[in-house]
Image: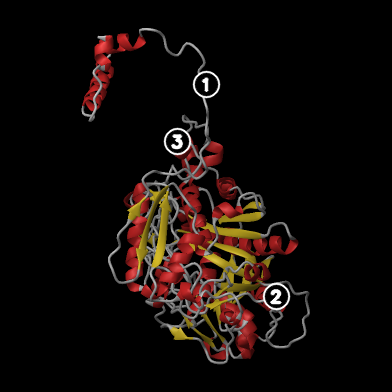
Amino acid sequence: MANDHGQHGTNGVPNGTSNGVFNGATNRTTNGVRNSVPNGTTNGVHNVVHNGVPNGTSNGVHNGVHNGVPNGASNGAPNTVPQREPIAICGIGLRLPGGVTDVPSFWDMLVNQKSGRCEVPKDRYNVDSWYHPTKDGHVPSRYGYFLDNVDIRNLDTSFWSMTKKEVEILDPQQRLALEVVYETFQNAGQKPSDLKGRKVGVYACNFGGDRQELDARDTQTRHPYDLTSTFDFVLANRISYEFNLVGPSVTVHTACSSSLTGLHEACHAIYSGECESAVVLGSSIIYAPTVTVAFRGHGVLSPSGKVKTFSADADGFARGEAVLAVYVKSLSDAVRDGDTIRSVVLSTAIGADGKSSTMTAPNPVEQAELIRRTHELAGNAEFSKTAMMECHGTGTAVGDPLEAASVASVFGDHGGVYIGSVKTNIGHTEGAAGLAGVVKMVLALENETLPPNLNFIKPNPKIPWEQAQLKVPLAATPWPKGKDKVVGVSSYGIGGSNASALIASASHVLGNYDHSEKEGTIDTQASAPSHTKLFVFSAKHPKSLERMVQNHQAYQMGNSDCLSDMAYTLAMKRETLSHRAFVVVNGIDDWILFYSSRNTLDAPGKLVFVFSGQGAQWAGMGKALIKGVPSFRKSIEDMDSVLQQLDDPPKWKLKGKWS
């Protein structure tokens, strides 16, 4: 993690925003991002993961307060359902395969067609023992999509409230979830301390509990923290407890659709007033081969360990790991509070396949109904304006054609649509899959570019490409002409629990609002590029502080135009922790750092007066100490020496009076 807690090396780089991100007014800069500083956990984390890529820019960012929120209708079509206020996505945090630890590195992976595929790491399970290409009870491939750059054993014990006894058995999913949620708040420019005791919901979504299964195998060992450290139901509760959030605390299990279902539930909790904002977390960490073996029995895994969604040679999916989160709140609240608005959730919907051909077979009719439903809820019945559908897209022989058929039935008569799947980059991350698709589309909207689909060799002949005008982006594609900045995301559970969402860019909903036109909100001196800026840093561990400074310095070298934003965010959007430093920068000269001479506690110290009363000293005590305690005798001699060096030294000596 970076910025406030202490593990070596993490995401110590500005998080800010990308092109097309709306930022509410905070009364400081004209066109920079409010939150343009590193978001991970290096600013105060001593021992976690390395997360060192700058993740923010201030290009094309709108700033300002916008009174009144549009209702989402973009085509004048009559609404057939009651409309709800859109939900703002304010912050993002993540750990993804391929060394992705922040938003810019994820976008780099997407647009440059990088893959997170790798061999099963040795600290997960021994793939040499479990791999066999044809034998039941084994895994069909040595490959998958793993967080191979993350040591899942690490946790900054000084940053959280858990005891050593509790930490030693803590599920790595909980460890990574805490870090990623902290970074998500930072990415949103939200101090976690400001949320304590408030109605902030937590929706933690995963697929299963490998850790629980592994611990259950050892029947001879019991641990006092088994219940709260290894069972997967406690994931949301751990986050709520550590951050002191009192909104709904819910762990969602709907298999592969868990995290998009969690987003749906979070939005509805905000609508109903159960919470004022919410964190939605998707998590998938693979500790054991058991679930992989079970998937093999259903014939859905790729022998090559590679996801080839919509390609004719697709042979199934490969499992992937991911931990990622978004921080959401109502759009009007986000505008009122001057929050970063990365994208806007226009609507969400959930449903089920019902009785399809088999329990695990998709139902394209119900999938299509969900897509239509999200458009209706958003007041956007003009399907021809939706630019892309981020599909579930597992790359299976059955699933791809059926899902494509559902998309074709909605968009085929309305000019078609682009389709793709993030699984070609990071694998099937199961409980985190839906949220991974959401974040991919948020970045596509911000950058006004459709990311390419990997491993697409030849179009699957079972998909009606020409008839339904379906297209797969094979390279980074500029936003299609005539299409709104609106995209859909679908996520389907293996048991038939489905979810869908419609997402728009901030500019599509709020327009090109220029906050600089608001009188009294600009400090021209503070935003003048020629002036020096004060950067303040704090962390919970000296090594974290050192890494934090290094990461910010590296980022500043390539982003000297962001000095005002970095100074603002470091001063106003970050926690103040015990180890502190500051530097005055101008974007040209070397940094000369000044460190605090003492480590100040988070809370002010309490002054205690102790009155010992009589009996603390007695006659002859000094003489006895001189004779019996060498260190005391030396101190007296040293003081005598000092006294004798005075211009008018005394004629007596301390030791002489008592020796």
Q: Quadrant of residue 556?
A: bottom left
Percent of width and height locating residue 194? 59, 54
Asked if the residue at tag 2 contacts the one at tag 1, i.e. Cβ–Cβ closer than 8 Å, the answer is: no
- Give the Cα separation between the discs numbered 1 and 3: 36 Å
Of the numbered discs 2 and 3, the one sitting upstream in the chain is 3
Q: Is residue 494 visible?
A: no
Of the numbered discs 1 and 3, the one sitting upstream in the chain is 3
Quarter of the rendering occupied by the N terminus: bottom left
Q: Amino acid at mark 2?
A: Arg
- Identify which residue is drawn at 64% across, 90% down: 413
Mark 1 or 2, closer to the camera: 1
Read off the residue under disc 1. 611
Asked if the residue at tag 3 contacts the one at tag 2, i.e. Cβ–Cβ closer than 8 Å, the answer is: no
- Give the Cα separation between the discs numbered 1 and 2: 74 Å
Disc ID at residue 453: none
Asked if the residue at tag 3 contacts the one at tag 1, i.e. Cβ–Cβ closer than 8 Å, the answer is: no
- Identify which residue is drawn at 39% across, 75% down: 561
Disc ID at residue 164: 3
Residue 206's place in the image compared with 636, above or below, is below
The residue closer to the viewer here, 567 or 262, is 567
Percent of width and height locating residue 34? 51, 69
Q: Is residue 163 left or right of residue 405?
A: left
Q: Amino acid at mark 3?
A: Lys
Q: Is residue 111 left or right of residue 593?
A: right
Mark 3, residues whose alpha carbon is within 10 Å: few (<14), some, or many (≥20)?
Answer: few
Q: Is residue 124 left or right of residue 166?
A: left
Residue 541's place in the image compared with 320, above or below, is above
Read off the residue under disc 2. 373
Percent of width and height locating residue 389? 56, 78
The residue closer to the viewer here, 314 or 649, is 649
